[in-house]
Amino acid sequence: MLYRSLIGAIAFVLALGTTISGALASDDAKYPDWSGQWRAIGGNRWDDSKPGGLKQNPPYTPEYQKLFEASITGQAAGGQGNDLRFTCLPRMMTAIFPFEFVITPKITFILFEAAMPRRVYTDGRAWPTNVEPGLTGYSIGKWVDEDGDGRYDVLEVETRNFKGPRAMDQSGMPLHEDNETIVKERLYRDKNDKTLFRDDVTTIDNAFTRPWVITKRFRKEKDDREWYENNCTEGNNHVSIGTENYFLSADGYLMPAKKDQAPPDLRYFNKRQ
């Protein structure tokens, strides 16, 4: 009897495992194939359909237009302007380095070669009330089957709960210091060109006179391309002191990062006699 009970238990476990496996396989079949490495088209620009810098023409209020122009002027003089990427702060969907999607039923991960992962929660949760704000915000998404074929093809995402300072691309386009930004996205693979991926982005921010709507495009890399370890902090010779950025020379000395830059305040160091 024990023998028969054992056989029955094993059969039950195998049947249960087959059922779970089949359920998981069926569940996986609902999600799109976004595998591979994706890289932004148009380089390090927010709106890849326009030239960089002032020609991006963001819908700024007069106050933030001046801050944007000052960033461009500062960069032309050799500084960093409003762009703090040199300090290794993240800037996600600009994506000049490759990224990939890892899709699970409850979370979709966007893994960047040169930045921390982005998490998009798709488990139906409400907005949290006690989560510390972050530079990448907090993202909640919803899968949509637009063509009704039983397979999801669009991921709708809303991101809130930011902290600053933040800039939208390398030109230093600032976002409002109140950090009340809301970003809405529609992520989807092009139906006619499977090597093309799109992200329709609406940025709602008090630095703008209206929501700024653009479409970012990404191209799939060759399947045999390797991933590389790309740590921003490794070999980064930028040194930020106060409101100024300096540079560490090859022989280990602090040097100016722009013409006629004043040295840092050394009040806490003993002066040599």
Image (cartoon, helix red, strand yellow):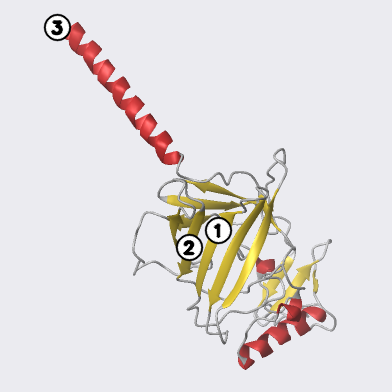
Q: Which residue is mark 2?
A: 157
Q: Which residue is mark 1?
A: 187
Relative to 125, say whether 171 is above or below.
below
Q: Residues within 10 Å of mark 2 (few under 14, many from 20)?
A: some
Disc 2/disc 3 C-alpha distance (Å): 56 Å
Disc 1/disc 3 C-alpha distance (Å): 58 Å
**From this viewpoint, which residue is outermost toward the bottom?**
62
Q: Which of label 2 and label 3 is nearer to you?
A: 2
Disc 1/disc 2 C-alpha distance (Å): 8 Å
Q: Which residue is mark 3?
A: 1
Relative to 102, say whether 15 is above or below.
above
Question: How many numbered badges does the structure rendering display?
Answer: 3
Q: Residues within 10 Å of mark 3 (few under 14, many from 20)?
A: few
Badge 1 or badge 3: first in the primary sequence:
3
Residue at 57%, 47% (x, y): give it: 34
Residue 87 numbered tag: none
Q: Are marks 1 and 2 in contact (CB under 8 Å)?
A: yes
Type of amino acid under label 1: Leu
